[in-house]
């Protein structure tokens, strides 16, 4: 019999065990081993069966067992201790609170330095735990790690996103190695979620207007991630029309129309959900909104609407106010990876007065404008709606400044106001407990970390090696289990699967490669020369074993063909004991890979990997990275914490580039990595290898942490954004009105501003010396602006062949009256120098001189 529908009944716990309910619903258990151990001890067998999921455990442990435990004083004491620990974790001041106090101590009277009281963080996916499968890959897992680190640090964040009925797809393989997708339906009542409701118990419904007078409604679920609430909107409610119920059916499924509805719900509905949540709970309304990638960008439009209807601001004033408190993070340097909608589609939804009353459609469309007049660009809107923006590694910051420089015409690429915060990963989630203990790490991220291994005498090589071997052995068991299950799934009979018991060898150098399968990640680079790979796998003394995993987007047949190539290669009876493809890469599998792999391989097409985080998770466990210098590895590779695969930058023929880079990869693996791994002392321990492991743990350990990332966001983005937001809203939004008025005056005056005359002189009779003072002067037509409203700058630098300036220094010039300007600057370089003069907007509420994309150059 098949069930007609599925629903979940939660067990009712005997009163003395009530605390287990709280411990199971607060997702802090996902990174707190003592809580996991407590749950496991309820019934180790069931714990295993339910994949370590406390809520499922509680509903499947027999009632008699629960009653027995309810009378077990020892168990109750342990439960109380863990519950008390959670309570302390949730309430005691942490890094953020200490930082607030420090700043208050120094701030004497001014609140300029205070940190925001609340920050909303919007993302289309959140990968907190496999028990809440609401993510597809890197972006979601990063968002989950962001929340967890914010919780550990005490940062008052509120997460906002959608709850998908089927999450992302589950992957299996057909007999011939083709990816097959399935979408198990999730019942939110069986997930660690709580419905947001009025005090009366009536569920909150967020409303968003759809064209044709229809309304899209969504209920709001709350997951509790340590100290952080995560609000997830869910359109699957009876009050909705049938098609609208499906808006949150799947992550990254469906067509453009489906997708824009999801993004409207996440952005516009998301803001409404946060407003209601804060009103109901008394939590501060957010001062800062963080848009994690363009998808959630409509949140800015809803906030503009709020200010137009609630504060009687005009569009420009509202835009100015919203920008001040918005941070935008871009995540992809792949132009095709940027979300774009046909303008007609945006017009269809935003053209009706009902969705955002009072907000002009033309102004909305202008925010997403790009080169192609038929397309609406969500990244461009993200940048135009945020006063502060960043990429996710230093290299990606650079690439993003070049990619988006068209939005700031007249400025050098390095002046484009997009910074960078390198991604990080949540240590307590991704580091094996044994390794963390060795490092003396705790959940308090302000405690020093990663330093334990260097000069930490008791951790001998033998001990470290034992730990690494244990992790590898655990991975080998998991590989065998999964290979067998995958073959059964593909239709093999158990009788022919005896060989799976000896797949992989716990003594062999183990290399991992797992990621989504877009072209730029080059899943099959390792197959470039199949015979050379085979020789590495089957080397008589120094074999390598390779574990591969990854999902292709369901609509991407090219990606599926790449997976099939790997699977077919790995199916060969001659190598299948040394190379495996494991289907259904997700957080539960990923953990074993990061723990157990000796080497983490990454070979993207540089510079298309914005950051990459899987290698960081491997590094936290003492895995050594073998990677193209892209994303985070470009800035954190130091020559002895792993290996850099040389890139054939500048080779434009992709086939030839792949050939060159694959050859470099084989060469490194065969002549450096494997020999080092198998170079053993008398006790069988590879001391030179372990020296690299120690160095990796010590140097990368602190840098790859999500707590480092979140602290950077707080100091460099959230705090300044909160200050800007507070400056524009004081005295009835006087700041926003001033700045908007200034922008309007600029708009009128700018075409008429010009640098009329310039000159430069030095004291020397012949060629001046480096560092000697030079006087630059200019006369500027200000077209009615006040001298205080512009910044006239002297720009000095080296001159290239075509007269372009580079390596420039800039200096603001002094107004000497009647449009005259002058400044003395020391000559910054020897050799051929040049100078120019430029005029920039100046206003105290601007975050950067390039912000408005306006500049007038001399000549
Ligand atoms: C970390 C992680 C990713 C992202 O890895 P990248 O190196 O950024 O590709 C994807 N999926 C899962 C399950 C992860 O844990």
Image (cartoon, rainbow, N blue to C red):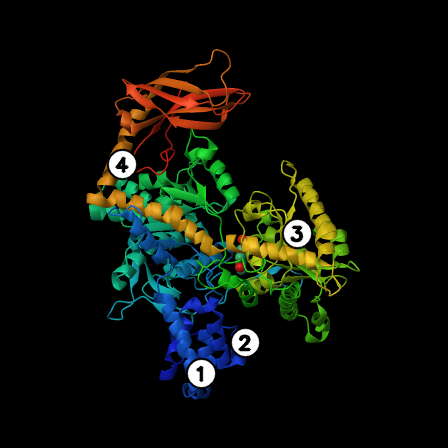
Pointer 3 local density, CA inside 10 Å: few below 14, some 14–19, many at least 20: some
- Is mark 1 in CB contact (under 8 Å) with mark 2? no
Q: What x and y, as percent, mark residue 469?
A: 66, 66
User: Is ligand 1 within 8 Å of the beta carbon of the residue shown at mark 2?
Assistant: no
Left or right: residue 547 versus residue 392 is: right
Looking at marks 2 and 3 on the same chain, the residue that comes earlier in the sequence is marked by 2
- The answer to whether residue 453 is above or below residue 200 is above
What is the number of the mark on residue 821?
none
> Which quarter of the rendering shows the C terminus?
top left
- Is mark 4 in CB contact (under 8 Å) with mark 2? no
Camera-side mark, 1 or 2: 1
Return the residue at label 1: 75
Camera-side mark, 2 or 3: 2
Looking at marks 3 and 4 on the same chain, the residue that comes earlier in the sequence is marked by 3
Residue at left offset 36%, top offset 69%: 194
Residue at left offset 28%, top offset 28%: 789
Secondary structure under tag 4 reads helix
Residue at left offset 58%, top offset 60%: 453
Return the residue at label 4: 739
Return the residue at label 3: 524
Secondary structure under tag 3 reads loop
Question: What is the spatial separation of the Cα atoms under label 2 and label 3, in whole angstroms?
Answer: 34 Å
What is the number of the mark on residue 48?
2
- Front position in the image: 34 or 18: 34
Looking at marks 1 and 4 on the same chain, the residue that comes earlier in the sequence is marked by 1
- Is mark 3 in CB contact (under 8 Å) with mark 4? no
Q: What x and y, as percent, mark residue 100?
A: 33, 54
Looking at marks 4 and 2 on the same chain, the residue that comes earlier in the sequence is marked by 2
Question: What is the spatial separation of the Cα atoms under label 1 and label 2, in whole angstroms?
Answer: 20 Å
């Amino acid at each position: 019999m098949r069930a007609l529908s599925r629903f979940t009944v939660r067990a009712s716990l005997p009163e003395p065990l009530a605390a287990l309910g709280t411990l199971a619903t607060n997702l802090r258990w996902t990174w707190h081993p003592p809580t996991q151990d407590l749950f496991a001890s309820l019934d180790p067998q069931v714990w295993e069966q339910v994949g370590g999921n406390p809520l499922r455990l509680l509903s499947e442990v027999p009632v008699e067992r629960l009653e027995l435990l309810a009378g077990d004083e020892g168990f109750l004491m342990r439960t109380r201790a863990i519950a008390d620990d959670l309570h302390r974790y949730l309430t005691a001041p942490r890094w953020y609170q200490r930082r607030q106090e420090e700043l208050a101590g120094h701030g004497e009277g001014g609140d300029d330095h205070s940190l925001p009281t609340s920050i909303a963080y919007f993302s289309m996916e959140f990968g907190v735990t496999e028990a809440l499968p609401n993510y597809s890959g890197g972006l979601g897992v990063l968002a989950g790690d962001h929340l967890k680190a914010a919780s550990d640090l005490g940062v008052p964040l509120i997460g906002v996103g959608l709850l998908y009925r089927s999450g992302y797809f589950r992957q299996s393989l057909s007999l011939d190695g083709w990816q097959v997708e399935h979408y198990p339906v999730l019942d939110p009542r069986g997930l660690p979620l709580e419905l947001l409701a009025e005090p009366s118990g009536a569920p909150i419904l967020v409303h968003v207007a759809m064209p044709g007078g229809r309304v899209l409604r969504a209920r709001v679920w709350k997951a509790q991630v340590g100290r952080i609430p995560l609000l997830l909107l869910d359109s699957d409610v009876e009050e909705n029309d049938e098609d609208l119920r499906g808006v949150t059916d799947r992550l990254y499924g469906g067509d453009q129309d489906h997708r824009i509805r999801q993004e409207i719900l996440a952005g516009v509905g998301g803001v409404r959900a946060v407003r209601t949540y804060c009103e109901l709970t008394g939590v501060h309304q957010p001062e800062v909104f963080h848009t994690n990638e363009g998808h959630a960008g409509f949140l800015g439009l809803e906030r503009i609407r709020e200010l137009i209807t609630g504060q009687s601001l005009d569009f420009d004033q509202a835009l100015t106010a919203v920008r001040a408190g918005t941070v935008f993070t871009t995540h992809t340097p792949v132009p095709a990876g940027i979300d774009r909608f046909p303008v007609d589609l945006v017009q269809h939804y935003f053209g009706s007065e009902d969705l955002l009353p009072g907000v002009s459609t033309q102004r909305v469309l202008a925010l997403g404008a790009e080169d192609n007049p038929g397309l609406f660009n969500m990244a461009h809107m993200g940048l135009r709606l945020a006063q502060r923006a960043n990429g996710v590694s230093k290299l990606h910051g650079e690439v993003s400044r070049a990619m988006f420089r068209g939005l700031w015409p007249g400025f050098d690429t390095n002046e484009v106001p997009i910074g960078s915060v390198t991604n990080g990963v949540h240590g307590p989630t991704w580091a094996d407990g044994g390794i963390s203990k060795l490092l003396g790490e705790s959940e308090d991220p302000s405690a020093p970390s990663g330093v334990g291994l260097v000069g930490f005498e008791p951790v001998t090589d033998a001990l470290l090696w034992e730990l690494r071997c244990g992790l590898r052995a655990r991975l080998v068991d998991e590989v065998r289990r999964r290979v067998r299950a995958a073959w059964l799934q593909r239709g093999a009979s158990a009788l022919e699967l005896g060989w799976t018991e000896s797949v992989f060898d716990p003594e062999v150098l183990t290399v991992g490669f797992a990621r989504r399968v877009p072209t730029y990640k080059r899943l099959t680079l390792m197959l470039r020369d199949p015979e050379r790979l085979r020789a590495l796998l089957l080397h008589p003394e120094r074999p390598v074993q390779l574990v591969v995993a990854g999902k292709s987007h369901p609509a991407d047949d090219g990606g599926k063909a790449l997976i099939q190539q790997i699977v077919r290669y790995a199916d060969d009876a001659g190598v299948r004991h040394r190379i495996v493809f494991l289907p259904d890469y997700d957080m539960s599998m990923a953990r074993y890979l990061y723990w157990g792999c000796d080497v983490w391989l990454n070979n993207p097409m540089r510079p298309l990997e914005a950051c990459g985080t899987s290698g960081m998770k491997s590094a936290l466990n003492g895995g050594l990275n073998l990677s193209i210098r892209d994303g985070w590895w470009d800035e954190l590779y130091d020559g002895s914490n792993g290996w850099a695969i040389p890139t054939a930058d500048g080779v434009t023929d992709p086939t030839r580039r792949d050939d060159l880079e694959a050859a470099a990869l084989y060469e490194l693996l065969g002549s450096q990595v494997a020999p080092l791994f198998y170079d053993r002392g008398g006790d069988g321990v590879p001391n030179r290898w372990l020296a690299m492991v120690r160095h990796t743990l010590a140097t990368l350990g602190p840098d790859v942490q999500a707590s480092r990332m979140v602290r950077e966001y707080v100091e460099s983005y959230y705090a300044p954004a909160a200050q800007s937001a507070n400056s524009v809203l004081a005295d009835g939004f006087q700041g926003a009105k001033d700045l908007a008025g200034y922008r309007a005056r600029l708009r009128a005056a700018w075409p008429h501003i010009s640098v009329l005359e310039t000159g430069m002189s030095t004291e020397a009779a012949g060629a001046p010396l480096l560092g000697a003072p030079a006087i630059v002067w200019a006369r500027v037509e200000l077209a009615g602006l006040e001298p205080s409203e512009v910044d006239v700058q002297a720009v000095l630098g080296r001159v290239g062949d075509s007269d372009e300036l580079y390596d420039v220094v800039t200096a603001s010039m002094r107004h000497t009256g009647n449009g005259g300007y002058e400044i003395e600057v020391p000559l910054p370089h020897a050799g051929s120098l040049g100078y120019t003069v430029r005029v920039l907007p100046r206003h105290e509420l601007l975050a950067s001189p390039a912000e408005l994309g306006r500049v007038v150059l001399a000549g």
